[in-house]
Image (cartoon, helix red, strand yellow):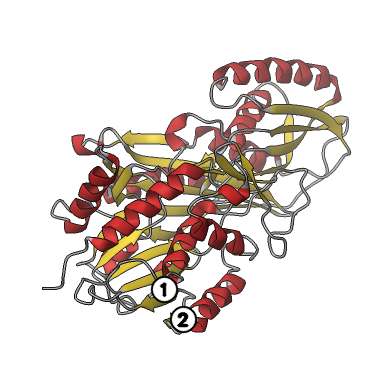
Amino acid sequence: MNKNDLKPSCVFEQFARINQIPRPSKREEKIIAYLKEFGESRGLDTQVDEAGNVIIRKAATPGYENKEMVVLQSHSDMVCDKLVDIDFDFDNDPIQTYVDGEWLRAKGTTLGADDGIGCAIELAILDSNDIKHGPIECLFTRDEETGMTGAFGMKPNFMKGKMLINLDSEDEGQIFVSCAGGITTYIEFDYTKEEAPAGMTFMMASLKGLTGGHSGDDINKKRANGIKILTRFIYMEQNKMNLRLASFNSGKMHNAIPRDGKVVFAVESSKVAEVKADWAAFQEGVREEFHVTDKTMEFGLTEEKAEKVLPEETGRKLIMAMQGVHNGVFAVCQDEALNNMTETSSNIASIKTSDNKINIVASQRSNVMSNLQNMANTIRATFELAGAKVEQGDRYPAWKMNAESKLTAIVVETYKKLFGKDPKVLGIHAGLECGLFSEKYPDMDMVSFGPTLRDVHTPDERLYIPTVQMVWDHLLEVLANIPEKK
C-alpha cells in the first residue's frame, strides 16, 4: 500500500493538509486560521469563539432539512513528542508521514492522528456535495491535550445541536458512552544549590527507549514509567551510601507516560564501582520485569563533570516522595456494564530541574469523582510530607453513561447493519471533552468513536488505515439515520 491508495481519499487528503500546519497544544493559531478560512471560503457559517474553538455549520442536504442537528467534534491540537536524536521543530516543520504496511506513521515524531484524523473526517464532510445529512455543526476545540481550555472556555450557547459525535476515540468497533474526569497536580521543591562535599564523583543514570503511551488508555498495561524506574535506583543507592542529588529530568506531557529520563547525582569516589555494579544488576531486574511491554529500553551510566547539588535533606525527601507516591491503576470499576475498566489512576508525568527548583507534574483520572478527589489527595499528601508546595488544577468532570441515549441506539444499529456484528459499548478511562460538554449542555446526547490508533502521544503513534474507511462509512450511515425533530 502507498499513499495514493489510502481510502477514503477525501479524508486522507484533508489529513495530509492538516499535517502541513503546526498545531502544538496552546499554540494552535495557525490551525485555527486554516479552519476559519476553510469554512468561510466555502460560504459556510463559521465562528471562532474567545477560547479559540472553531465551529462551522453546514445546511442539510435536500430532503433532510427536518433532521435533528448533529454536532461532529474533534480537537485541533496535537501532542508534540519526538525521538531524542531527531531534529524537528513542531512550531514550523510539517509532520512527515509514511505508510508501513496497513499503518500510517510519522518519521520520528508523533503522527497527529490524535485528533487530526477526526478533524480530517469533519473537513471531508464539510467539503462534500454528495453526502446525505441533516443540518450539522463541525466543532474543532482548542488545547484538548494540555488542559481542555477550549472546552472549558466555551460558552453554553456556542453549539446549537442536541446530538454530538466525538471523533476522538482510538479503537474501531468500540462505542464510548462515558469517560473519566481528571485533575492535574503540580509539585514544586524550592532550594538553593550548594557545592558538593569534597571527594565526590558525579554520575548520570539515563534511560530511553521505553514504550510510554497515553496515561489514560495505556495506564493499565504495566508499561514502565521512566521517572519511577530512575527513582527506584536512586532510592536504593541513597539508602546504602552518601548520595547527593544534582538534577532529575524526565517526561514532557501531563497525559503521557514518560519514555526516557536522566538523573545526575554525586557519590563518594570510593563508591563509584559499587554504583556501577548495582546499576548493572538493577537494569537486568527491570528488563525482566518489563520484558513484555518495554523490549527496547536502553540504560546508561556515565561519570559527569562536577556541579552543584541540592541540599541533602531536600534531595533525600524528594526521592523518598517519588518512591512512595502512587503511580498506575488505583481501582477498577465495580459496575459490571463497564467490564472491569480502570476506574481510578495516577501518572507521574514529568520532572524538570532548574537552578533553584524541581517541578513535578502528575495527572489523576477517575470515572468516580469522589475517588478522583481521593487520588488527588493521596498525591498531595505524599509530596506535602516531603516539604513540597502542591497546587491542583485543570480539573474536568467525568461523563456519565446515559442509559436512555437515542444516539447510542442509532450508532449501534447502523454498525450492526454495516458490518454484521455488534460493536462494544464501553466507558473509557481517558478524559474526553464530552465530560465538560455534559456540564454546559446537560441535555446533549453524546457518543464517541473513531479509527484505531496505537501508541498515541509517542513517536510510535500509528493509524490503522483500513479502520478509517470503516469509521467513515459508519458515520455517513449514522448521519443518514438521524431522526427528525419533534
SS at mark 1? helix
Residue type pointed to by label 1: Gly
Residue 50: numbered disc: 2
Is residue 147 shown to the viewer in this render?
Answer: no
65 relative to 80, above or below: below
| Closer-to-camera residue (400/391) | 400
Q: Are marks 1 and 2 in contact (CB under 8 Å)?
A: yes
Q: Residue at x 49, y 56 (%)?
A: 117
Q: Residue 14 at what x, y percent from top left?
A: 54, 63
| Residue at which label 1 appears | 153
412 relative to 60, above or below: above
Is residue 254 shown to the viewer in this render?
Answer: yes
In whole angstroms, how far apart are the C-alphas of marks 1 and 2?
A: 8 Å
Say few, some or many: other residues with alpha carbon within 10 Å of mark 2 (under 14 / 14 to 19 / 20 or more): few
Determine the image quadrant of residue 438: bottom left
Determine the image quadrant of residue 435: bottom left
Q: Residue 80 at what x, y percent from top left?
A: 62, 54
| 202 sits to left or right of 154 | right
Q: Sequence-wise, which precedes: disc 1 or disc 2?
A: 2
| Closer-to-camera residue (477/301) | 477
| Closer-to-camera residue (437/138) | 138
Q: Residue at x 56, y 31 (%)?
A: 224
Quarter of the image with the C terminus in it: bottom left
Say few, some or many: other residues with alpha carbon within 10 Å of mark 1 (under 14 / 14 to 19 / 20 or more): some
Q: Residue at x 23, y 45 (%)?
A: 417
